[in-house]
């Protein structure tokens, strides 16, 4: 199987063009190639496919073989892949995902895509659509009211015997945002212990991605992320979008935010009028290769 290793600020995946290759068992393939000792090493597997409703389709799998709806860092890499390899000459590309069609605008330098701005759509705040099983829909104890539904904003959650305050958002995949008092506390956080407690919490029927966040100022935040099926990763694009939405909902930042992640920075904008979140960041190719699958 021919592949390309790519990353968006350290969130790395193995990319396979299904315009040329056939991947018969993507779940097992994702587990195998993601292994950093016996495989290629990655946070998962991304298949680039033809689409009947968009320019291309992105099908992605976590390192444990489970399917994921969307990934902001991966979709930037897909856009770079198809442009750099002359599969399209468009600088605005539509990409089908399980979270709907996303649109990517490319910045080109020396005939290569170096920066990608993605229309990530509107944040989903209705609990049953995230999904989150928390209290009774419409109850004021769930958090802020949103029409006939409630939002889970700054609500208590107990994990490992400790109480946290969470804000839940879906950006096509589910996120739970937890604010941490300061950067030192964030750095010291034992995320390998706390992350799984949230991922497998009874509140989250599809498991959850959890972001731990410190606000540095009205336009800058720092975050770490525990991704379901992958563990702690260097970056999460949808997570950065969810964090920005959570910061605004809690009155902690303005609507344009630089999110500092372990692998680098993303610039996130949540437009007030349209309600759309835009994510801008880099995408990089690491190497091409070929691997023999053992099944």
Image: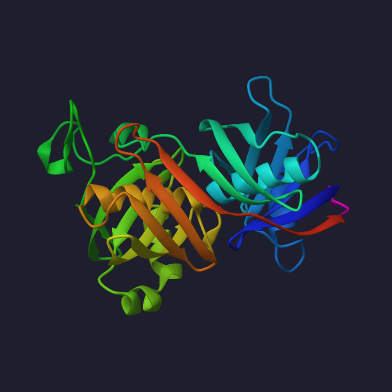
Can residue 140 be seen here?
A: yes
Task: State the residue at coordinates (63%, 54%).
Answer: 63
- Is 202 left, or right, of 30 in this rendering? left
Colouring mode (rainbow / by chain / secondary structure / one colour): rainbow
Task: State the residue at coordinates (58%, 38%).
Answer: 104
37 above or below 111? below
Highlighted range, magenta: 291-295
Residue most extreme to the front: 110
Residue 261 painted magenta? no
Task: State the residue at coordinates (24%, 41%).
Answer: 134
Q: State which quadrant residue 205 falls in.
A: top left
Residue most extreme to the left: 140
Q: How many marks?
A: 0
Q: State which quadrant residue 23 falls in.
A: top right
- Is 132 left, or right, of 71 in this rendering? left
233 above or below 272? below
Of 293 and 217, nearer the camera is: 217
Magenta stretch: helix, strand or loop mostly: loop
Residue 180 in the image: state x and y as whole percent: 28, 67
Task: State the residue at coordinates (16%, 31%).
Answer: 138
Residue 200 in the image: state x and y as whole percent: 41, 52
Can residue 202 be seen here?
A: no
Residue 77 in the image: state x and y as whole percent: 66, 49
């Amino acid at each position: 199987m021919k592949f390309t290793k790519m990353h968006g600020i350290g969130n790395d995946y193995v990319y396979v063009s299904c315009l040329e290759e056939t991947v018969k068992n993507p779940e097992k393939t994702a587990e195998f190639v993601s292994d950093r000792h016996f495989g290629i090493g990655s946070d998962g597997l991304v298949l680039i496919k033809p689409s009947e409703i968009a320019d291309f389709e992105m099908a992605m799998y976590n390192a444990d073989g489970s399917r994921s709806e969307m990934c902001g860092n991966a979709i930037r890499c897909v856009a770079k892949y198809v442009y750099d390899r002359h599969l399209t000459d468009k600088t605005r590309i539509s990409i089908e995902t399980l979270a709907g069609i996303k649109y990517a605008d490319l910045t080109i330098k020396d005939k290569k895509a170096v920066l990608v701005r993605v229309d990530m759509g509107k944040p989903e705040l209705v609990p049953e659509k995230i999904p989150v099983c928390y209290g009774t829909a419409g109850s004021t104890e769930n958090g802020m009211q949103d029409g006939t539904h409630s939002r889970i904003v700054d609500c208590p959650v107990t994990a490992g015997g400790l109480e946290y305050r969470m804000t839940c958002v879906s950006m096509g995949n589910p996120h739970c945002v937890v604010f941490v008092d300061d950067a030192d506390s964030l750095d010291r956080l034992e995320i390998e212990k706390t992350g799984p407690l949230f991922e497998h919490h009874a509140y989250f029927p599809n498991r959850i991605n959890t972001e731990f966040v410190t606000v540095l100022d009205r336009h800058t935040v720092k975050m770490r992320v525990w991704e379901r099926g992958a563990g702690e990763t260097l970056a999460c694009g949808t997570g950065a979008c969810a964090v920005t939405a959570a910061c605004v909902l809690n009155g902690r930042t303005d609507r344009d935010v630089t999110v500092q992640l372990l692998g680098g920075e993303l610039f996130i904008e949540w437009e007030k009028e349209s309600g759309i979140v835009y994510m801008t960041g880099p995408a990089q190719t690491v190497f091409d290769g070929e691997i023999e699958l053992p099944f």
